[in-house]
Amino acid sequence: MSGSTARRGEAHLWLLLEEALTSIRRGGAPVDEVRRNVHAVTGALAAAEVVPPGVAHRLETEFGNILAVRGLTPLAGFTAHDPEPVSESTATAIFDASPPSPPSPPVRDGAGVWLEAEIDRHLDLLAAFDPTSRPSAGTEALRMLAGPVRAFEASRALDRPGRALIDDFAATLAEVGYEVRRPARASPKRDGRARSEWVDFLRQALGTPADGFEPRHTRNVDAALGDVRPGLSVQLTRISWTADALELVARIRSERLDATRRVLQARDVLDLEAVWSCRVTDDRDGLHLGQPTRARYEGGSATRFVLRPGLAEGTSAIAIAITVGGRNVTGKVEW
């Protein structure tokens, strides 16, 4: 993101803190709910690389201190010293020294990439509800996304396709039968269109994959999906499925975490703790979604996704998008 975008993003966060404090003191809003919203927005801006993670963390700390000194939260939560910002230049020596990590180029459309993956997550969650018995789930999903979307738009980080995502999501929910009410301070409402792949996904009778997933079909593959950024690559190694669930294993390879390296830097820790999302579209335009995971599979060198639904008989190709923060890699696998 450009410097002006980051400045607008940081300015919006300061405005958000002021609004949050006012909503608590004058509006009687629950403190825990307001804090969750603040953390959601700062986390989204940092994940999409609209503002540096250190800035987001500092403002979260500032807000926590304000709440503590005003008696809205226990004083024990007050941080009396400036937090040590996490920077890529900070290294924790484990064994020996090694060359620094290569710099990452600025992310393009990180807000749109992050938002699409987040909508995928909500679609998977909504698949567990029946709109006739839980119509408010649609409004709740829009409420959770409203804060980050408003921040992205204030930062001018969303392009036209990105801005259309939230409106298409709302139109899709209405088409399926969910109650759709946009929060008062959400982004401006525009005419959206219900996306057929989202509608079809929500209208399926999806079961919850069993913990002990037993695949009916397995394909060992060697598909390099590319580099999320310099030094951090994603490689698909296995695809397994039944009619109900689809499992993918992706190896997350970081040069800095290679066994031959001897220094673990702050960004490497973030690589290990990053949240990864996956979206699959099969050759019949069927959508397959699941919840995000961390790279803790196969000793921490890979991540495992379990998506719904599984693959139908005769499927011979899938298109894959794997996202972390505001960056993603895509590819296609055929068999």
Image (tube, helix red, strand yellow):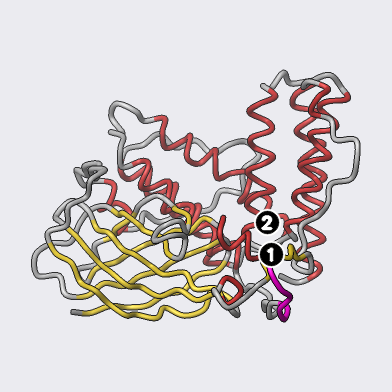
Residue 239 falls left or right of residue 107: left
Given residues 306 and 176, the one toward you in this image is 306
* Image x and y of residue 305, in percent: 35, 57
Task: Kindly identify the residue that appears in the image at 37 percent across and 42 percent down.
Answer: 125
Alpha-carbon neighbours of circle 1 within 10 Å: few (<14), some, or many (≥20)?
Answer: few
Given residues 178 and 204, the one toward you in this image is 204
Asked where in the image residue 254 lies, by quadrant, the reply is bottom right
Q: Residue furthest right?
A: 81
* Image x and y of residue 248, in percent: 31, 63
Prevalent SS, magenta region: loop
Given residues 238 and 298, the one toward you in this image is 298
Whether 209 is among the magenta residues is no
> According to the image, label 1 marks what residue?
94
Task: Kindly identify the residue that appears in the image at 79 percent across and 54 percent down.
Answer: 55
Disc 2, SS: helix
- Cβ atoms under marks 2 and 1 closer than 8 Å: no
- Stretch of the chain drawn in magenta: 95-100
> According to the image, label 2 marks what residue?
46
* Quadrant of image for the N terminus: bottom right
Disc 1, SS: loop
Q: Is residue 43 above or below residue 70?
A: below
Q: Amino acid at mark 2?
A: Ala
